[in-house]
Amino acid sequence: MDTNNKGLIGRIRSLGWGFAAMLFIAGIVFWGGFNTAMEWTNREAFCISCHEMKDNVYQEYRSTIHASNRSGVRATCPDCHVPKEWGPKIIRKIQASNEVLHKVLGSIDTPEKFNAKRLELAKHEWERMKKTDSRECRNCHNFDSFDYAEQGRRSSKMHQTGLNEGKTCIDCHKGIAHTLPEVEQAIGAPKEGATPEEFHPPTPKPEEAKPEADKAAKG
């Protein structure tokens, strides 16, 4: 029995190695084009190509240390909002299709609309960063590389406390690159803004030992 036509190798031989070479080259071209398009959308210029971003959050970002500092090292939009690892990056890009939809719908196409949704948008990003242990922050900042002796007394204390309590960057550093949502503080006014707990979640306290457990331990 002729076994040359069995399996993948057999099929390739039946079609000819020239066809296989063409498929291989086509795969490289497709992957190169896909990756090029992916990286093209991963630039600051692309992120602020719509006025919703350019006229709102980008203007806030320009005055922060992430945009301008003594060393000239900048963290741009994709550095903070797009994962570097391929898998998480693809997932984030798929999620971003929802942002394209709202661009078409005009959900935040005016400063008034944007500020009305600022808290909601901020919460989404805070939750995402919390779930990933502030992954994008840690591309540049890492507890293991901190030199506490070079930090200010307050910063050094807070960083070490945060590390010991298992906190992540976004727990304390909300608003580091963009304006925080407003907090309504007027007495008797509706509390529609962000609460202090949302800005700085309280540290979970260890569960107190139950009396029954204590009795069982003594017995």
Image (cartoon, rainbow, N blue to C red):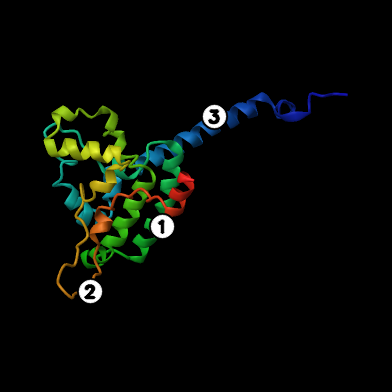
Q: Name the residue located 23 percent from the left edge and 29 percent from the top edge.
A: 146
Q: Give residue 25's mark.
A: 3
As drawn, which residue projects farthest toward the front?
A: 219
Q: Earlier in the sequence, mark 3 or mark 1?
A: 3
Q: Is 133 situated left or right of 32 in this image?
A: left
| Image x and y of residue 171, in percent | 28, 48
Badge nearest the viewer, 3 or 2: 2
* Residue receiving disc 1: 98
Which quadrant of the structure image shows residue 184?
bottom left
Residue in front for this viewpoint, 195 or 61: 195
Q: Is residue 17 above or below residue 82?
A: above
Q: Is residue 183 left or right of residue 93?
A: left
Q: Residue at x 34, y 60 (%)?
A: 103
- Residue furthest toward the right? 1
Residue 181, compared with residue 83, is above or below; it is: below
Which residue extends farthest bottom? Answer: 188
Image marks 3 and 2: residues in contact by CB distance under 8 Å: no
Q: Position of residue 164 (x, y in %)?
A: 29, 37
Is residue 44 depicted above or below 29 in this figure? Answer: below
- Residue 111 seen: yes
Mark 2 lies on residue:
190
